[in-house]
Image (cartoon, rainbow, N blue to C red):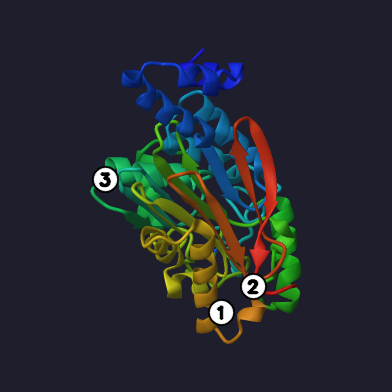
Amino acid sequence: MKRRNFIRKTGIAGAALSTVPSLFSKPIINEMSITNKYPVAVATWNFQNATKMAGSILEQGGSALDAVEKGVMVEEANLKNTTVGNGGAPDRDGNVTLDACIMSPDGNAGSVVYLKEIEHPVSVARKVMEETPHVMLAGEGALQFAIQQGFKKKNLLTKESERAWKEWLEHKEYKPIINIENHDTIGMLCLDEKGDIAGACTTSGLSYKINGRVGDSPIIGAGLFLDNKVGGAVGTGMGEAIMKSVGSFLIVELMRQGKTPQEACEEAVDRCVNQNQNYKDFQVAYIAMNKQGEIGSYCIHKGFSYARFHDGESTNNQSDSYLDS
Ligand code: ASP
């Protein structure tokens, strides 16, 4: 058993540590304070299967980077989730096009946009980050790169998504559905046992979008941003509003200036509200986590929640909102 787990499980901390010689007491007490906070996984919406996967990797001593990748892959593979990965809703022409990005604690980043026929765009984004000098690959080039890296093509349009799309074609009404079926883009932040933070974000974007549309989710600074000295943030909802205010970057910079994750999320949502007269017509939601493992969350409309895995416990947490409905 690792020492930190031993200390946690036996509960001997306070009394025993107060008697150890001063030469040793400082590092041990520091480790105890870390034990209370790390590791932790948080994700947009009630994606507890994803945070549990990430949490199990973190609890075995895995890195935050591995945890966010494997965590969001759970939803990319989930056929019931019609807004991420395989089974994602298509654009108005019937194409399933995926957007994803990933950031590592060293500040490196990778992203793919308008990627077709690959079930796990987040893993392609990680390859872009690790195997190329670039940050973002798009469309045909991203697909070609994925195949070169050994990814297999797959039809991502399920019968259910195709049926729903065909029903949509009958009216062709293009309007965002707030808190769509209560699941949406997955953005995840993990703090590993070393206290390093990583993040990932992956989506099929807005259902029935115009062919070629790319949202905030794969844009570093919009759908995801982190700084390993400060913390990280992820967004979900109307990507255009998040992009126009560079929401995740804004939140991290506000935390750098001393705001709590909660205050920073609230200010970023205020920014969207002030920039968009029609803010009542769409949802924007953020979660943020600082280096101490403190979490904040805020959204425009009620109904957004985030999943958290910490200390063996998985929870779904309702977010406060700007509007009461
Ligand atoms: N932010 C995503 C996008 O605009 C969609 C969502 O999270 O609902 O593509």
- For numbered disc 2, what is the local secondary structure? loop
Residue 132: give its label.
Answer: 3
**Disc 1 from disc 2: Cα separation:** 9 Å
Q: Which of the two labelled residues, at mark 3 and mark 2, occupies the earlier sequence position?
A: 3
In this figure, which residue is indicated by the disc labeled 1?
Answer: 273
Residue 166 quadrant: bottom right
Residue 93 quadrant: bottom right
Amino acid type for the residue under numbered disc 2 = Tyr
Front position among marks 3 and 2 = 2
The reply to whether the C-beta atoms of the residues labelled 1 and 2 are less than 8 Å apart is yes
Q: Residue furthest bottom?
A: 277
- For numbered disc 1, what is the local secondary structure? helix
Front position among marks 3 and 1 = 1
Give the x, y percent position of residue 206: 59, 66
Q: Nearer the viewer, residue 319 or 132?
A: 319
Check the image and report above or below for 300 versus 46: below
Mark 2 Cα shell of 10 Å, populated few (<14), some (14-19), many (≥20): some
- For numbered disc 3, what is the local secondary structure? loop
In this figure, which residue is indicated by the disc labeled 2?
Answer: 322
**Disc 3 from disc 1: Cα separation:** 38 Å
Q: Residue at x 36, y 41 (%)?
A: 127
> What is the total number of numbered labels drawn onto the structure image?
3
Amino acid type for the residue under numbered disc 1 = Val
Amino acid type for the residue under numbered disc 3 = Thr
Q: Which of 158 and 108 is in front in this view?
A: 108
Mark 3 Cα shell of 10 Å, populated few (<14), some (14-19), many (≥20): few
